Image: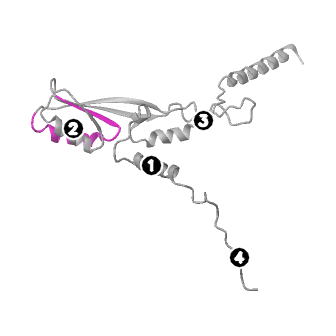
């Protein structure tokens, strides 16, 4: 083998080893995915005239942007603030107090959740000794979770249970399970088995 061929062989081998070493730096030996949902806020503003037609215009705009549970609404500078707030709340949006002064407008902050970098197939699913998950581990579950959550803000802060919500029913079920005595704690009733001879 010539010196040139030997040099190229050593160079190819060193590049292959460097690739392996580089890949070993991306080890994720834990049980949590490195791909987690990220919540992003987008702000939309709608100018109002400050008159009696503001509520109708606001309702048409809410319809147009598909206002829903992922949105936070503030109404400012119009006499119809309460009515517009009620329209927004009826669509499931979170309404916060807006100022009565300043320009007549509606400010909507929309939260969206997604999982950046997914799918991620940079690390294969072949056997290796580092005990790492694949690079795509968690992408499907977390991307589906981000797509299904009604209000992405709940991924950031969460919220307390309100009276009459499902969480109270769940707590009742858990409490009933914990406090109810086990039916077999007194032992099994002895029954004589008998029959005709």
Q: Which is more N-terminal, label 4 or label 2?
A: 2
Give the residue number, with chain letter if any, for mark 4: 193
Residue at 64% x, 29% y is 28
Q: Is residue 21 above or below residue 197?
A: above
Q: Which residue is mark 1?
A: 170
> Label for residue 85?
2
The one of 86 and 13 positioned closer to us in this rendering: 86
Q: CA distance from mark 2 to mark 4?
A: 73 Å
Q: In this rendering, which labeled residue sits more in front, label 4 or label 3?
A: 4
Given residues 50 and 96, the one toward you in this image is: 96
Above/below status of 46 relative to 161: above
In this rendering, would 137 be left or right of 37? right
Front position among marks 1 and 3: 1
What residue sits right under mark 3 in the picture?
A: 136
Mark 2 vs 3, N-terminal side: 2
Q: x%, y% of residue 177?
A: 51, 52
- Magenta residues span 51-76
Q: Give the CA distance from mark 1 to mark 3.
A: 34 Å
């Amino acid at each position: 083998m010539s010196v040139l061929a030997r040099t190229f062989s050593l160079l190819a081998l060193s590049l292959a080893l460097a690739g392996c070493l580089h890949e070993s730096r991306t080890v994720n030996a834990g049980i949590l995915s490195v791909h987690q949902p990220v919540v992003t806020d987008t702000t939309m503003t709608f100018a109002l005239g400050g008159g009696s037609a503001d509520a109708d215009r606001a309702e048409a705009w809410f319809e147009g942007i598909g206002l829903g549970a992922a949105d936070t609404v503030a109404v400012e500078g119009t006499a119809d603030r309460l009515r517009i707030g009620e329209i927004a709340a009826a669509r499931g949006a979170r309404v916060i107090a807006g100022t009565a002064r300043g320009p007549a407008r509606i400010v909507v902050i929309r939260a969206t959740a997604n999982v950046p970098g997914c799918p991620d197939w940079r690390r294969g699913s072949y056997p290796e000794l580092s005990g790492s998950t694949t690079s795509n581990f968690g992408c499907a579950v977390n991307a589906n979770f981000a797509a299904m959550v009604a209000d992405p803000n709940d991924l950031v802060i969460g919220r307390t249970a309100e009276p009459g919500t499902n969480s109270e029913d769940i707590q009742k079920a858990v409490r009933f399970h914990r406090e109810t005595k086990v039916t077999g704690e007194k032992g099994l009733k002895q029954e004589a088995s008998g029959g005709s001879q």
